[in-house]
């Protein structure tokens, strides 16, 4: 897998991205790859004016025009909601009168249920929840998508095509989307945390900052690439590194005593509990 997704030959209708922050901006980058056609162009809204100039992209600033979101969604085939969860309800109520019939509305907001969105939109509006992760910025996202009651196979196919511009896509029922977010959504943070800790261990063994970075990040990159390019499960690859009575075996024994399986189960359970709290707060 390269540094960007293979998006050749994807054709999409007019897209409005409301809140083109880090994730919305990553998706915008994916949509502007060679081979991706967005008929009618892309519209984006932000709180402040965007000084950059993108071919085929129309930018609206809310500080200059309070109707910017409504203007952006008029006639759009897909509306992507990139604002924070706390802002979703007000945004949906704002744009609802301006949506064309059949417009697909996709939310990136964690914890905001399909039902919470559907109650604020015209009856029959197709809605999809999506949970991409931050590697979208380099075209290596894993995105989970779940369909609302009015979203059919064609709407899911459209959502899949959109998110395939920034990586891989997994369709799941809504009851699993929050659990998915605890793995792939929060997962990059878990990996970065492990890298932090191993780099700290390297420094404690006498390596300087740059040496620790090279040792640890190079090892993670190589291990992931080895896993990707073989048909072997991680258990087998770990076994091949772990010689009997060797140094790695001794280190793995320490990690096993720490019961990392229980730690990760507890961590993902905590993330899931918070997602459900957010859903109750925003219902």
Image: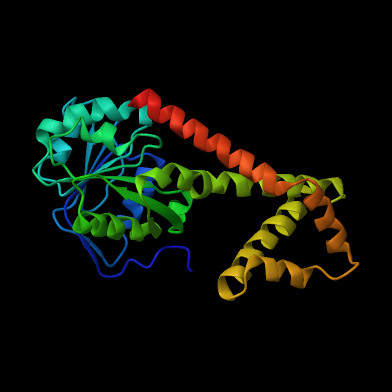
Q: In this view, does 275 lie to the left or right of 15?
A: right
How is colour applied across the structure in the image? Answer: rainbow
Residue sitting at 50 percent across and 31 percent down?
A: 274
State whether residue 62 appears in this view: no
Image label count? 0
Residue 167 in percent (x, y) is at: 41, 60
Where's the C terminus, which quadrant? top left
Q: Position of residue 7 (x, y in %)?
A: 33, 66
Q: In front: 169, or 188?
A: 169
User: Can residue 101 be seen in this snapshot?
Assistant: yes
Q: In this view, does 164 lie to the left or right of 183?
A: left
* Residue 127 percent location from the top left of the image: 23, 44
**Residue 272, horizontal then vertical, whole percent:** 50, 37
Q: In this view, does 272 lie to the left or right of 161?
A: right
Quadrant in the rendering for residue 220: bottom right
Check the image and name the residue furthest to the right: 245
Q: Which residue is drawn at 91% across and 67% down?
A: 245
Among the 4 quarters of the image, the one containing residue 114: top left
Say which of 108 and 145 sits in front.
145
Residue ID at (77%, 55%): 211
90 up-or-down from 183: above or below: above
């Amino acid at each position: 897998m390269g540094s960007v997704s293979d998006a050749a030959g994807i054709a999409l209708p007019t897209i409005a991205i409301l809140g083109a922050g880090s994730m919305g901006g990553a998706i915008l980058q994916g949509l502007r790859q060679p081979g991706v056609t967005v008929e009618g162009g892309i519209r984006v809204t932000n709180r402040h004016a965007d000084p950059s100039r993108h071919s085929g992209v129309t930018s609206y600033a809310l500080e200059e025009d309070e109707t910017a979101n409504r203007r952006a969604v008029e006639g759009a085939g897909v509306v992507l909601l990139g604002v924070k969860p706390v802002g979703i309800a007000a945004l949906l109520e704002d744009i609802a009168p301006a949506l064309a019939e059949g417009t697909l509305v996709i939310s990136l907001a964690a914890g905001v249920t399909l039902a919470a969105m559907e109650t604020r939109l015209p009856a029959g509006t197709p809605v999809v929840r999506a949970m991409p992760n931050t590697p979208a910025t380099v075209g290596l996202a894993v995105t989970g998508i779940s369909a609302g009651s009015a979203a059919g196979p064609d709407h899911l196919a459209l959502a899949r095509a959109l998110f395939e511009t920034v990586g891989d896509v997994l369709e799941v029922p809504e009851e699993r989307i929050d659990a998915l977010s605890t793995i792939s959504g929060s997962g990059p943070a878990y990996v970065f945390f492990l890298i932090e800790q191993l780099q700290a261990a390297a420094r404690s063994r006498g390596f300087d900052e740059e040496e620790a970075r090279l040792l640890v990040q190079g090892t993670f990159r190589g291990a992931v690439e080895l896993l990707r390019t073989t048909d072997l499960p991680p258990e087998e690859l770990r076994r091949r590194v772990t010689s009997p009575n060797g140094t790695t075996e001794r280190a793995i024994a320490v990690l096993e005593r720490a019961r990392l399986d229980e730690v990760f189960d507890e961590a993902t359970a905590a993330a899931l509990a918070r997602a459900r709290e957010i859903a109750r707060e925003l219902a």
